[in-house]
DNA sequence: CAAATTCTGGACATCATGTACAGAAACTAC
DNA sequence: GTAGTTTCTGTACATGATGTCCAGAATTTG
């Protein structure tokens, strides 16, 4: 994706990292909306003008950081096998909950009332796409299915909501149990549904 | 709840309605975040100072309006029967999608990147509670189940996400079909799950 | 070292917020 | 209708955030 020409000035790299870390820290401390660009610059120990040299606003900083984190995560997990397990034999749901636990303070805010609407929407779209790609890899004949897309968003929203509930309730169960729960609630999924009824009622 | 002493000055009622309508209109026009209190006052043809006489900020106005709308909806639908249908014999999912369709322009914004995080979170909690109350009414023995709560949030999140997808894709199917889809994806739900496995793996 | 790039810190115009207040307007009760 | 109360208005003000600009200092690259 970001084919950086390998020529990134060290100052630039440093500044961006400082700003990203500062944003993450501040989100946890005071919620996304209550952060100003000045706050971020201060926390990063950087001039406010420098911030605008790199990002249009804090939202752009958030989204770029978001992309970095998820690209790295996807990279680390590697391709998903045909049995829907990772290379290490872990269900993808478990990965999701483990990742959440790792950054719990961050997600606890971002998925709460103090988070950002755009973030959650993008997360859902991102998840839905990853899920869909995974399913279509194994069942290529589903590629064009519009209902399949709807089902993926259904699953993605369900997962995010369950994660939110988990965080809101001090994570009363381990990640593996939560993954098990979500997995069992989604049993069937697109495949089960399409097998059961390949068309919606109004489609005959 | 709001035991208004029936002594609401007509001016107050009028102002509040004007402000509420103005907010709704502006949300559709330019997204929630881009609205200022001045905008709302202007659109409502009311002095800005008057706004602050009634609400702390636009968020308070939004939430009060939200409560009004959903209380009215719940009132109109009436109690849910033991077969999970409304008094008119409609599945609750259908009500949800019909209501969405009625206020489509509003939800299209509020459930998008231009919406409000707090709104969606509250909506999920509201839905989860309504669902849980409905289930517990029929199956009182589930009352204390912590997993039951998780499942309700799972379902609520799934419903909201499916609605979001529906709106984002120009509502390609009628409300009834969408309700059918969601219903079939949730088959089993808490009941099915608890029957299948009353305890999480780690609980023995 | 020299040239190029980035960072700094201060300034500036603009705009939104929240509060205050005095007078005008509208409402309620009688 | 009038009196008394409450609400609305218009304006003003202090505060703080935004986005842009610039000249000089600092750092990096070759």
Image (cartoon, coloured by chain):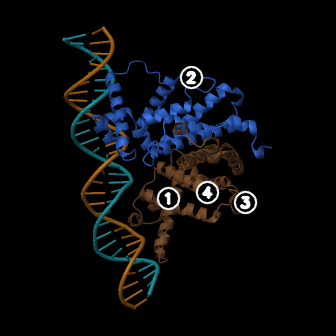
Chain colours: A brown, B blue, C orange, D cyan
Disc 2 to disc 3, C-alpha distance = 47 Å
Q: Give the labeled residue for mark 3.
A: A89
Chain letter of disc 1 in the image: A
Most extreme residue toward the front, as rendered? Answer: A204
Q: Is residue A20 left or right of residue C12?
A: right
| In this view, the mark in front (1 or 2) | 2
- Residue A60 falls in image quadrant: bottom left
Chain letter of disc 3 in the image: A
- SS at circle 1: helix
| In this view, the mark in front (4 or 3) | 4
Q: Is residue B198 left or right of residue B7?
A: right
Q: Is residue A196 left or right of residue A48?
A: right
Disc 4 to disc 1, C-alpha distance = 32 Å
Q: Check disc 4: other Cα within 10 Å, few if <14, some if 14-19, many if 20+.
A: some
- On the same chain: label 1 and label 2? no
Q: x and y percent of residue B173 in the render?
A: 49, 40
- Answer with mark 4 or mark 1, whichever residue precedes in sequence: 1
Q: Residue at x 50, y 41 (%)?
A: B163
Q: Give the labeled residue for mark 1.
A: A23
- SS at circle 4: helix
Disc 4 to disc 3, C-alpha distance = 15 Å
Chain letter of disc 4 in the image: A
- Answer with mark 3 or mark 1, whichever residue precedes in sequence: 1
């Amino acid at each position: 994706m970001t084919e950086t020409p390998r020529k990134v000035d060290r100052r630039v790299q440093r500044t961006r990292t400082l700003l990203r870390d500062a944003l993450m820290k501040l989100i946890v401390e005071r919620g996304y909306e209550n952060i100003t660009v000045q706050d971020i610059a201060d926390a990063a120990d950087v001039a406010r003008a420098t911030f605008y040299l790199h990002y249009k606003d804090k939202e752009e900083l958030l989204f770029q950081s978001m992309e970095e984190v998820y690209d790295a995560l996807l990279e680390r997990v590697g391709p998903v096998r045909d049995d829907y397990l990772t290379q290490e034999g872990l269900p993808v749901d478990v990965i999701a909950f483990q990742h959440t636990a790792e950054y719990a303070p961050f997600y606890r805010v971002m998925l709460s009332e103090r988070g950002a609407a755009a973030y959650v929407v993008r997360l859902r779209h991102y998840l839905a796409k990853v899920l869909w790609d995974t399913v279509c890899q194994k069942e290529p004949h589903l590629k064009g299915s519009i209902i399949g897309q709807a089902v993926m968003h259904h699953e993605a929203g369900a997962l995010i909501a369950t994660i939110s509930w988990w965080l809101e309730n001090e994570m009363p169960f381990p990640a593996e149990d939560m993954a098990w729960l979500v997995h069992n609630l989604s049993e069937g999924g697109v495949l089960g549904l399409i097998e059961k009824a390949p068309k919606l009622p109004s489609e005959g």
